Image (tube, coloured by chain):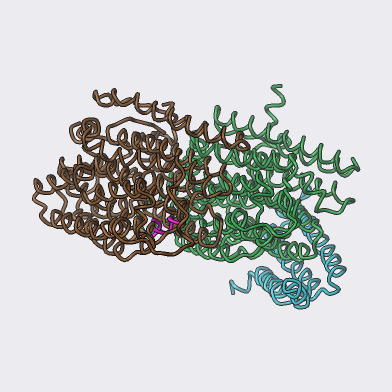
Chain colours: A brown, B green, C cyan
C-alpha cells in the first residue's frame, strides 16, 4: 500500500525543495519510478487471483475506508503510474521550454492528482472511490487554471462546476440510495443491488451513476473536457487523456460490473438507454471534432468520443466487450497521450495551435509527427497498434450479444475518426510549408519531450505485440 | 474529588460567572484575557468530564441549593446537552485563545477587559441554557447571554455595529418575551416549571388551547433566537459588524444553543407525539427550512462582504438543522445534532480566518481579497479547507452531516427533498468559490506584500480546521454521541 | 359573560399589542424601547394575575387564613423585572451611543446615512 503514500510523500516534500528546480524535478521522477515499481510488484499476486485488502479505518459505522486490489484497478494503476514517469520527463521539457510560472505548485498538484488516481484505482468500496474522485477534481483544478488569466479562470470554472455539481448532485445521491437500499457499498462480483432495487428504478439509478460520474464525459456533461484544454499540455496529456477521464470510465465500469452486476442490467429493459446515449456521444463528439481547427480541442472531442466507446462497450454487457473496455482504457491512454504530447511539442517548438497552420510541419519535426501518426492510427484502430485490439474485442462482444446497432456505431465512428485524424497527418507531411520567413527557425522540440512522445508511441505499438499482461488482467475482470 | 464531581453541573455555569467580574477588576487587557482563557478552558474540561460521566452512567440530575426537583431548580444533564455544553465551551475556548490580537486591533483600548467580561457572561448564559432543567431558568440565562452579546457586538468600533446591536436587542427581547409567555402558559396548565415534570403532566391536558398557544409562542420565540427563516433579519448585520473573533464565537454557539432549545422544548417537553402528530409541526418547520436554505444561499452568492456572505450561509445552515428535526426520525435528529457540532466547527474556523484577514487588511470586502492567497497563504488555506467543509466535500465534517441528512431524507422516502439538499450544496460551491477565486486567481493590487497573520490567531484557526478534518475522517465519536442524543430525545432505546 | 370574566387577560392582550405596535412602527429608537417596556409589562401582568387565587390572601402563614395566592409567579416576575430593567438600560445606552455617532435617533435618518456611507 506504499503505492498511495509515495505520491503523497512527494507532494509534501516537493514544496520543500521547490527552490532548486533540479532537485525538484529529480524528486518527481524518483516518485514516479518508485510508484510504478510498487504497482508493478503488486501485479503478479493479482494475476494469480489474490485480492489483497487493506482497511484503513471506519468512516461511518459499518462503512470503512478500504482498498482492494482487483484486475481492472490494476490495469488502471499500471497505466497511470507508468505514464506518470513519461509525463514527468515531458513536463520538465515543456515547463522549462515555455518558461511557465509557479512550477512547484504544478508538480505538487500533479503528485496529489496521482495519489488520488491510485486511490480511485484501488478503492475497495464506493465511498472510498467517491472520496478520491473528489480529491482528484480538486487537486487538478489548480492545474487547469494554471495560467491564471481570464481564459484559464473560465476554463477552471467550467471544469470545477461540471465535475463538482454532477458528482455532488447525482453521484452522491446514487451512492446514498445504494447505501440506504442495501447497507453496503462494497464492490462485489455479481453486484450488490440485485433484489434491492427493482424495475425502472434500476434505469434511474444507473442514470444517476453514469451522469454523476461527470469525468466519464458522457453527453451532455462533456463540456468540461474541452474547457480544461486551457491547461498546460502535460496536464492535458496525463490528466485529460489518462488520469481524470479514465477515472471516470473506470468508475462507470466498476459500478456496472461490481455494483449493479451484469446479470441484473441484462434483465432490465429500462437500463438499455445507456447504450444509446453512449452511441450518440460517440457520433456527435466525432462530428464536432471534425469541425475543430484548434488541435487540442480536436483531440479533446476525440477523447469524448473514445470515452463513450468504453461506456458503450460496458453497456453491451457481453464478457468480450468488457475485456475490450478494460483494454481500451490502456489503449486509449497510450494513444491519446502521444497525440497530446505531439500537440504540446508543436506548441513549444513552433507556437502553433491550429490544424490549418500545420502545413509541412512533418518535415521540420519528423519524430513528433511520426509519433502523432502512430497515435492517430491507434485511435482509428488500425493494426499494428493497440487500438485495433481493443476495438476488435468490443466488436466481438457486440456481435456475440447480437447488438448490431453497436456494431454499426463502431464502424461509423471509425470512419469519422479517420476523417478527422488523417487530414492532420496529410497536411503535416504532404503539403508544402507556408513560406513565411519568420517561422522558419524552429526544429524539433526539446529532447525530453521528444523522448517522451517517442516512448509512448513505441508503447502503442509494443502493447499490440505484448498483449499478454493486460489481456490476462482484463480477463480477470470477467472471469472472477 | 468526589465532592467536586458531584457539583460539576453547577460549576459549569459558576466558573465563567465568577471569572467575569474578576476580569473588570484585573484592569489590564492581557491579564483579563489570560483569566478568561483559563476560565473558558476550565469550562471545557468540566464539559468533557460531564460528557464522560453521562456516557458512562446516564443522565445526571443536580438539585440547586439542595431543593428537590419539582420545586427547586434542577440542573439535568443528559447526552444531548452534555454534547451542546462540549460544543459551546470548546468553541469558546479555542476562539478566545486566538482572539487577543484581533480584539486589541478592533476594540477601543479602555474597553478590552469589558469585552472579556461580556464574553464570559455570554458563555455563562449559553452554558446555563444548556445545563438547566427549569424552563424559567432558561429565560434568565437566555437574557444573560443576550444582553452581554448586544454589548459584545456594540463594542466593535464601527457605528453600524451600534445599529446592528440595537436591532438585535429589539428582536432578541421580543423573542425572549415570547418564550416567557410560553413558559407562563405552560405553568398555568401544569403548575410546574421543571422540564421533565411538564413533560410528564402535559399529555393529560394536551387538548387545551392554552397548550397550543404556549407551543406557538415558544416556537416563534426560539425561532427568533436561532434566526430561523424568516425571523433571521437581525443576524447578517450583527455578524458582519461585530468584532471578528466575537463573530467566530457567536457563529459556533449562539444559534446552536437556540437549536438545542428547540430540540428540548419540542421533544422533551411537548413530546414528539404532540408536536408532530397533534400540531403537525413538520409542516411548519419543513417549508421554512427549505425556503431558508434556498433563499439565504442565494442571497449569500451576491454579497460583497465576505463576513456577511458567511453570515447568510449560517442562516442557510440553520435550515439544514431544522430540516433534520422536522423529519422526526432517529437518523434525522442524528443529522441535526451532528450538524450542530460540525457547523460550529466549520463556521468558527471560517470566521476565525476573517479575524486574520481583518487584522491584516482592515476589511473583509470581497474586492480586498484579491491576491490574498499569496499574501496570507496559511489563512487562505484554512479558508479553503473550511469552505470545502461547508460545501460538504468528503473527508471534512460537512460531508458527514450531509451524508446523514440525505440518508434520513431517503429513509423517509422524501426524494425531491434529497435532490434539493444536494442542489443547495451547489449554491454553497458558488459562494465559496467566489472568494477562493478572488484570493488565488486575481492578482493583488499594488504594493501588496506578504502579510501572514500572527501565529497567535493562526494556531487556534488551524486547530479548528484540523478538527474539521479529523472529525470528517473519523466520525465514529461524534456520530455515536449524536445517535445516542437523538435516541434519548425520541425516547427510543437502542 | 365568561369572556368578560377574564378581563385581566384582555387587558394583557391589549397592552401587549400596543407595545408591539410601537416597537414595529415607531421610527424613534427611544420610543421603540418604551414600546418594548409596555410589551414586557403586559407579560408581567399575565404572570401576576395568573398567580392570584380569587379570595386568597398574601402567602403569609397566619392562623385564620386557609386560602393563599400562589407566590411563585410573583417571584418569577421579580426576576423578569430585573431582566427587563437590564435590557432597557442596555438599549438606552445603545441609543446614547447611536445618537453620539449619527447625530440622530430616528431610524429613517440613520438608514439614509448608512446607505450614503456604502455608496461613498
Q: Look at the image and tell me in which quarter the N terminus of chain B lies.
A: top right
Q: Main secondary structure of the magenta part?
A: helix
Name the residue nearer the viewer: A346 or B155.
A346
Above or below C19: residue A310: above
Q: Determine if the magenta segment contains residue A225.
A: yes
Report the span colored magenta.
A223-230
Residue A460 in view, yes or no: yes
Could you tell me residue A422's position as x and y percent?
A: 26, 57
Q: Is residue B428 magenta?
A: no
Is residue B161 positioned above or below A128 on the image? below
Image coordinates for residue C6, horizontal then vertical, percent: 63, 69
Horizontal side of A455 relative to A406 (left or right) equals: right
Depth order, front residue of C65/A85: A85
Q: Position of residue B382 (x, y in %)?
A: 62, 45
Q: Image quarter for residue B404?
A: top left
Left/right of residue A418 with respect to residue C57 in the rendered view: left
Point 10% across, 55% down: residue: A404
Query: Going 11% across and 52% down the picture, which residue do you hit?
Result: A403
Amino acid at each position: 500500500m506504499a503505492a498511495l503514500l509515495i505520491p503523497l510523500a512527494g507532494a509534501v516534500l516537493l514544496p520543500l525543495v521547490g527552490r532548486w528546480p533540479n532537485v525538484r524535478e529529480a524528486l518527481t521522477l524518483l516518485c514516479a519510478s518508485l510508484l510504478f515499481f510498487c504497482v508493478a510488484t503488486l501485479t503478479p499476486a493479482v494475476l494469480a487471483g489474490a485480492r489483497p485488502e487493506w482497511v484503513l479505518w471506519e468512516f461511518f459505522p459499518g462503512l470503512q475506508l478500504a482498498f482492494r486490489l482487483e484486475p481492472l484497478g490494476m490495469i488502471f494503476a499500471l497505466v497511470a503510474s507508468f505514464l506518470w514517469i513519461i509525463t514527468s520527463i515531458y513536463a520538465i521539457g515543456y515547463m522549462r521550454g515555455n518558461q511557465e510560472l509557479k512550477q512547484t505548485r504544478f508538480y505538487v498538484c500533479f503528485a496529489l492528482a496521482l495519489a488520488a488516481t491510485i486511490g480511485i484505482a484501488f478503492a475497495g468500496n464506493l465511498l472510498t472511490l467517491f472520496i478520491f474522485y473528489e480529491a482528484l477534481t480538486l487537486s487538478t483544478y489548480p492545474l487547469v487554471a494554471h495560467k491564471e488569466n481570464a481564459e484559464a479562470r473560465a476554463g477552471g470554472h467550467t471544469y470545477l462546476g461540471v465535475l463538482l455539481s454532477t458528482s455532488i448532485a447525482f453521484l452522491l445521491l446514487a451512492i446514498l440510495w445504494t447505501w440506504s437500499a442495501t447497507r453496503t457499498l462494497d464492490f462485489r462480483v455479481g453486484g450488490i443491488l440485485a433484489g434491492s432495487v427493482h424495475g425502472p428504478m434500476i434505469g434511474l439509478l444507473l442514470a444517476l451513476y453514469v451522469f454523476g460520474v461527470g469525468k466519464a464525459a458522457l453527453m451532455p456533461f462533456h463540456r468540461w473536457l474541452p474547457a480544461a484544454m486551457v491547461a498546460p499540455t502535460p496536464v492535458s496529456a496525463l490528466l485529460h487523456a489518462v488520469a481524470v477521464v479514465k477515472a471516470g470510465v473506470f468508475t462507470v465500469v466498476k459500478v456496472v460490473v461490481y455494483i449493479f452486476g451484469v446479470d441484473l442490467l441484462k434483465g432490465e429493459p429500462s437500463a438499455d438507454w445507456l447504450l444509446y446515449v453512449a452511441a450518440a456521444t460517440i457520433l456527435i463528439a466525432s462530428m464536432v471534432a471534425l469541425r475543430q481547427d484548434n488541435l487540442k480541442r480536436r483531440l479533446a472531442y476525440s477523447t469524448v468520443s473514445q470515452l463513450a466507446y468504453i461506456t458503450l462497450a460496458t453497456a453491451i454487457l457481453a464478457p468480450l466487450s468488457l475485456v475490450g473496455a478494460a483494454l481500451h482504457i490502456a489503449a486509449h491512454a497510450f494513444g491519446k497521450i502521444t497525440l497530446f504530447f505531439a500537440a504540446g511539442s508543436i506548441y513549444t517548438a513552433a507556437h502553433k495551435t491550429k490544424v490549418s497552420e500545420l502545413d509541412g510541419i512533418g518535415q521540420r519535426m519528423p519524430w513528433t509527427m511520426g509519433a502523432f501518426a502512430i497515435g492517430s492510427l491507434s485511435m482509428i484502430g488500425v493494426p499494428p497498434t493497440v487500438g485495433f485490439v481493443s476495438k476488435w474485442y468490443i466488436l466481438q462482444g457486440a456481435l456475440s450479444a447480437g447488438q448490431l446497432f453497436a456494431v454499426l456505431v463502431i464502424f461509423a465512428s471509425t470512419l469519422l475518426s479517420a476523417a478527422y485524424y488523417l487530414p492532420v497527418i496529410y497536411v503535416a507531411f504532404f503539403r508544402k510549408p507556408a513560406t513565411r520567413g519568420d517561422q522558419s527557425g524552429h526544429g524539433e522540440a526539446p529532447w525530453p519531450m521528444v523522448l517522451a512522445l517517442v516512448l509512448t508511441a513505441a508503447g502503442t505499438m509494443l502493447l499490440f505485440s505484448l498483449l499478454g499482461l493486460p489481456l490476462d488482467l482484463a480477463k480477470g475482470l470477467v472471469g472472477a | 474529588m468526589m465532592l467536586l464531581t458531584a457539583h460539576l453541573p453547577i460549576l459549569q455555569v459558576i466558573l465563567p460567572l465568577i471569572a467575569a467580574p474578576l476580569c473588570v477588576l484585573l484592569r489590564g487587557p492581557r491579564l483579563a484575557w489570560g483569566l478568561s482563557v483559563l476560565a473558558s478552558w476550565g469550562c471545557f474540561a468540566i464539559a468533557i468530564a460531564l460528557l464522560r460521566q453521562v456516557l458512562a452512567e446516564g443522565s445526571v440530575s443536580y438539585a440547586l441549593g439542595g431543593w428537590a426537583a419539582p420545586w427547586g431548580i434542577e440542573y439535568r444533564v443528559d447526552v444531548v446537552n452534555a454534547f451542546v455544553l462540549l460544543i459551546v465551551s470548546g468553541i469558546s475556548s479555542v476562539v478566545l485563545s486566538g482572539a487577543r490580537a484581533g480584539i486589541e486591533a478592533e476594540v477601543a483600548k479602555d474597553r478590552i477587559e469589558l469585552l472579556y467580561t461580556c464574553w464570559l457572561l455570554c458563555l455563562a448564559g449559553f452554558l446555563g441554557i444548556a445545563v438547566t432543567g427549569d424552563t424559567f431558568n432558561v429565560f434568565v440565562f437566555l437574557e444573560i447571554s443576550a444582553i452581554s452579546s448586544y454589548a459584545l457586538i456594540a463594542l466593535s468600533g464601527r457605528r453600524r455595529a451600534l445599529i446592528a446591536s440595537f436591532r438585535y436587542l429589539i428582536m432578541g427581547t421580543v423573542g425572549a418575551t415570547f418564550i416567557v409567555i410560553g413558559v407562563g402558559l405552560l405553568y398555568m396548565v401544569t403548575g410546574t416549571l421543571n422540564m421533565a415534570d411538564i413533560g410528564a403532566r402535559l399529555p393529560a391536558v394536551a387538548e387545551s388551547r392554552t397548550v397550543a398557544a404556549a407551543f406557538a409562542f415558544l416556537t416563534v420565540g426560539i425561532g427568533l433566537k436561532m434566526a430561523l427563516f424568516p425571523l433571521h433579519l437581525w443576524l447578517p448585520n450583527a455578524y458582519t459588524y461585530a468584532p471578528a473573533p466575537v463573530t467566530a464565537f457567536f457563529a459556533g454557539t449562539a444559534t446552536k444553543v437556540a437549536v438545542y432549545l428547540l430540540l428540548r422544548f419540542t421533544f422533551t417537553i411537548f413530546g414528539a407525539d404532540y408536536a408532530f402528530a397533534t400540531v403537525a409541526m413538520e409542516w411548519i418547520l419543513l417549508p421554512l427550512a427549505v425556503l431558508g436554505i434556498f433563499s439565504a444561499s442565494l442571497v449569500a452568492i451576491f454579497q460583497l462582504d465576505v463576513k456577511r456572505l458567511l453570515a447568510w450561509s449560517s442562516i442557510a445552515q440553520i435550515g439544514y438543522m431544522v430540516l433534520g428535526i422536522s423529519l422526526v426520525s432517529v437518523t434525522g435528529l442524528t443529522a441535526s445534532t451532528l450538524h450542530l457540532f460540525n457547523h460550529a466547527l466549520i463556521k468558527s474556523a471560517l470566521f476565525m480566518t476573517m479575524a486574520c484577514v481583518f487584522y491584516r487588511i482592515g476589511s473583509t470586502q470581497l474586492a480586498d481579497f484579491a491576491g490574498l492567497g499569496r499574501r496570507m497563504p496559511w489563512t487562505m488555506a484554512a479558508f479553503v479547507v473550511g469552505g470545502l467543509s461547508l460545501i460538504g466535500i468528503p473527508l471534512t465534517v460537512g460531508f458527514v452531516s450531509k451524508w446523514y441528512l440525505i440518508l434520513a431524507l431517503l429513509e423517509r422516502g422524501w426524494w425531491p427533498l434529497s435532490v434539493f439538499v444536494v442542489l443547495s450544496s451547489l449554491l454553497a460551491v458558488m459562494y465559496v468559490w467566489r472568494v477562493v477565486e478572488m484570493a488565488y486567481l486575481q492578482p493583488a493590487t499594488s504594493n501588496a506584500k506578504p502579510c501572514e497573520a500572527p501565529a497567535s490567531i493562526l494556531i487556534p484557526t488551524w486547530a479548528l480546521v484540523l478538527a474539521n478534518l479529523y472529525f470528517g475522517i473519523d466520525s465514529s465519536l461524534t456520530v455515536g454521541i449524536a445517535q445516542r442524543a437523538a435516541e434519548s430525545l425520541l425516547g427510543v432505546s437502542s | 359573560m365568561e369572556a368578560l370574566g377574564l378581563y385581566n387577560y384582555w387587558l394583557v392582550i391589549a397592552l401587549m399589542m400596543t407595545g408591539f405596535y410601537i416597537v414595529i412602527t415607531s421610527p424613534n429608537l427611544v420610543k421603540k424601547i418604551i414600546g418594548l417596556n409596555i410589551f414586557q409589562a403586559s407579560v408581567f401582568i399575565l404572570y401576576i394575575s395568573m398567580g392570584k387565587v380569587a379570595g386568597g390572601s398574601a402567602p403569609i402563614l397566619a392562623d385564620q387564613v386557609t386560602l393563599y395566592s400562589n407566590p411563585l409567579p410573583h417571584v418569577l416576575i421579580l426576576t423578569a423585572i430585573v431582566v427587563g430593567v437590564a435590557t432597557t438600560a442596555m438599549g438606552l445606552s445603545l441609543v446614547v451611543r447611536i445618537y453620539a455617532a449619527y447625530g440622530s435617533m430616528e431610524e429613517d435618518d440613520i438608514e439614509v446615512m448608512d446607505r450614503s456611507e456604502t455608496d461613498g
